[in-house]
């Protein structure tokens, strides 16, 4: 494994872990998540959806299944996680909702109690009130221990689209055309079919996490990742606010770091 703490200005806590491919990233991140559940079980994990996360949840299920039975059971019983976001208008039974995705990728494979895998309710009658309620529920749980984040092609984290200030709370947001296009695959390839709004934790809740793990894989994100690593923080790149946090680990594969086969 090729571990390289680099980048970031003098005040930045960004630490970079470079791994060769998405499967190496998944194994490493899954081990970090399990370790967090052992070390800090009293605080919830912050979880994300998206293609980047799929191999991570597969690796997590495998690693959990390989633990001694009693230890695995203890981790399952004490599990508590809060997802970043959910589409507005999609109910829990809609397979494209993030709740359904988490049920398929995490709850069932790990054998968790679905009540301990929290998400905002996308089909709530009043999404703004639901966003406030979800933010308060997270706060009452003590805030996030370790926050897992993916990176949007436009620099978003959660569904915090640019421009975005560092102090926004959990709220209802409009999705950009580029995000709806990026997520169209699950909606028959039609960006117009992707919900126009979502509930997302804000940068305030994200930056309040005790530590943060930003995971980036694939060549398509290489340009954006370079901008984020360079800083400085700007509302135009919501992920760049992570420079304001003292404990951020960026786990990326060679492709996302712009290192080709001969690089
Ligand atoms: C999505 C999600 C984010 C996710 C990001 C990257 O729209 N709201 O939480 O991390 O965009 O997604 P992907 O991993 O599919 O590239």
Image (tube, rainbow, N blue to C red):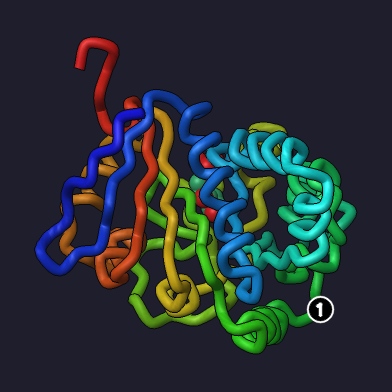
Location of residue 125 (image quadrant): bottom right
For disc 1, the marked residue is 125
Can residue 128 be seen in the rendering of this structure? Answer: no
Location of residue 170 (image quadrant): bottom right
Please state if 212 lies on the left or on the right of 121 as rendered: left
Please state if 16 lies on the left or on the right of 187 as rendered: left
**10 Å crowding of disc 1: few (<14), some (14-19), many (20+):** few
Q: Position of residue 147 (x, y in %)?
A: 51, 63
Location of residue 190 (image quadrant): top right
Can residue 82 be seen in the rendering of this structure? Answer: yes
138 shown above or below 29:
below
At 82% from the left and 52% from the top, the residue drawn is 70
Screen quadrant of the N terminus: top left
At 67% from the left and 62% from the top, the residue drawn is 86
Is label 1's Cβ within 8 Å of ligand 1?
A: no
Please state if 33 lies on the left or on the right of 224 as rendered: right
Q: Which of 106 and 183 lies nearest the eye of the viewer? A: 106
Q: Position of residue 192 (x, y in %)?
A: 63, 46
Q: Position of residue 67 (x, y in %)?
A: 73, 42
Q: Which of 237 and 49 lies nearest the eye of the viewer? A: 49
Q: Residue furthest left?
A: 10
Screen quadrant of the C terminus: top left
Q: Position of residue 123 (x, y in %)?
A: 81, 68
Query: Which secondary structure, mark 1?
Result: loop
Q: Which of 213 and 43 lies nearest the eye of the viewer? A: 43
């Amino acid at each position: 494994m090729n571990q390289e703490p680099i980048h970031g200005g003098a005040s930045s806590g960004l630490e970079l872990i470079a791994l060769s491919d998405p499967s190496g990233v998944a194994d490493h991140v899954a081990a970090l998540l399990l370790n967090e559940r052992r070390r800090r079980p009293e605080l919830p994990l912050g979880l994300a959806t998206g293609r980047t996360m799929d191999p991570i949840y597969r690796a997590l299920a495998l690693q959990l299944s390989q633990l001694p039975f009693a230890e695995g059971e203890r981790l399952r019983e004490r599990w508590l996680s809060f997802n970043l976001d959910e589409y507005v208008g999609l109910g829990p039974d809609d397979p494209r909702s993030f709740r359904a995705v988490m049920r398929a990728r995490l709850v069932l494979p790990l054998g968790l109690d679905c009540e301990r895998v929290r998400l905002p309710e996308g089909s709530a009658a009043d999404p703004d009130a639901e966003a406030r309620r979800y933010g308060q529920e997270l706060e009452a749980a003590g805030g996030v221990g370790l926050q897992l984040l993916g990176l949007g092609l436009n620099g978003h984290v959660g569904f915090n689209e640019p421009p975005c200030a560092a102090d926004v709370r959990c709220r209802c947001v409009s999705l950009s055309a580029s995000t709806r296009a990026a997520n169209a695959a699950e909606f028959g390839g039609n960006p117009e079919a992707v919900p126009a709004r979502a509930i997302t934790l804000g940068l305030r809740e994200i930056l309040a996490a005790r530590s943060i793990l930003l995971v980036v894989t694939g060549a398509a994100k290489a340009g954006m990742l370079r901008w984020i690593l360079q800083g400085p923080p700007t509302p135009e790149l919501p992920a760049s606010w992570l420079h304001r946090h003292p404990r951020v680990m960026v786990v990326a594969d060679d492709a996302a770091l712009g290192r080709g086969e001969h690089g």
